[in-house]
Amino acid sequence: MPELPDVEIYRQYLNSTALHKQVRNVETHSTQVLDGIGSRKLSSLVKDSRINEATRHGKHLFVRFGKNDWLAVHFGMTGYLAYYKDDDDQPEHAQVVFDLANDYHLAYVAPRKLGHLKPTNDPQAFRNREKLGPDALRDISSADELARIMKGKRGGIKSALMDQETLAGIGNVYSDEILFRARIHPSTRVAALSNTHYRTLFTAMQTVLKKAIDKQAEPDRMPKSYLLPHREEGAECPVCGGTIVRRKFSGRGAYLCEDHQEKLT
Ligand SMILES: [Zn+2]
């Protein structure tokens, strides 16, 4: 599922392709991905407008058309953006296609139709309405701040990191990676974490998210010392030589190394 680093890469992709281009037309191939707007309304909203800005909060991309018409874009499990010229290059599962005045197209591709495009005229209001927490990379600037937002959370640290109302942007893959680096077991209760743990966790969170963005959110490009290139059961742990295992926590499959990830009680 696209998480903060993936969506940041999509934002950069949009900025280097469709930014400042004018929309000539919009084709909606599946209204299932439209939320709070129909295909005709979407068309009249963005037609003849320019794509003026793209911002990100957590796993959401906000795209501004014209003066103040935004679309909040969520990528579901496998969504992404594609910019291309020839119709032959249109990816399969392009659900919404913006035809641009330079004869190129920007497509919102979602094979499983689980993401959505939702209109808003205020990303901050959208964020409040959807109860999205602070952005995991941009809005948390210290271990103390992380400790403060985690305070009082029940349950395990992996679930808390993935809870978008607590912290926006982290999902299954990067919560595993952060905890792997911080040497903390995913099922450790939030209540058991000390200030020292929060310092380790904060540093790991910043390092992992920045590194992933730096590597274009491509798992194969991550350093060998990270979990991502070894994310399979039975693989050798690059940190301690132990064995990577898969366990279920709160219904989600987590990858970890029980030899160096400490379970705190
Ligand atoms: Zn290990």
Image (cartoon, rainbow, N blue to C red):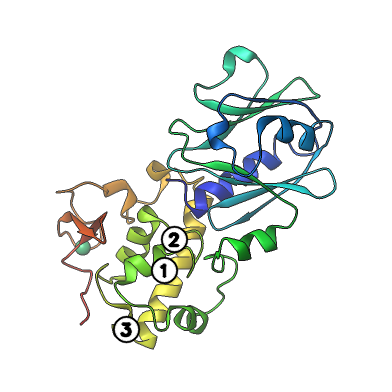
Residue 242: x and y, percent? Answer: 15, 60
Q: Quadrant of ligand 1?
A: bottom left
Q: Nearer the viewer, residue 129 or 21?
A: 129
What amino acid type is highlighted by mark number 3? Ala
Check if mark 3's residue and mark 2's residue have beta carbons within 8 Å.
Answer: no
Residue occupied by mark 1: 204
Count of labels shown?
A: 3
Q: Which mark is residue 191?
A: 3
What amino acid type is highlighted by mark number 2? Val
Image quarter hosting the C terminus: bottom left
Check if mark 1's residue and mark 2's residue have beta carbons within 8 Å.
Answer: yes
SS under mark 3: helix
Residue occupied by mark 2: 208
Quadrant in the picture for residue 109:
top right
Q: Residue at x 44, y 60 (%)?
A: 208
Q: Residue at x 55, y 48 (%)?
A: 7
Q: CA distance from mark 3 to mark 2?
A: 23 Å
Residue 177: x and y, percent? Answer: 35, 59
What amino acid type is highlighted by mark number 1? Ala
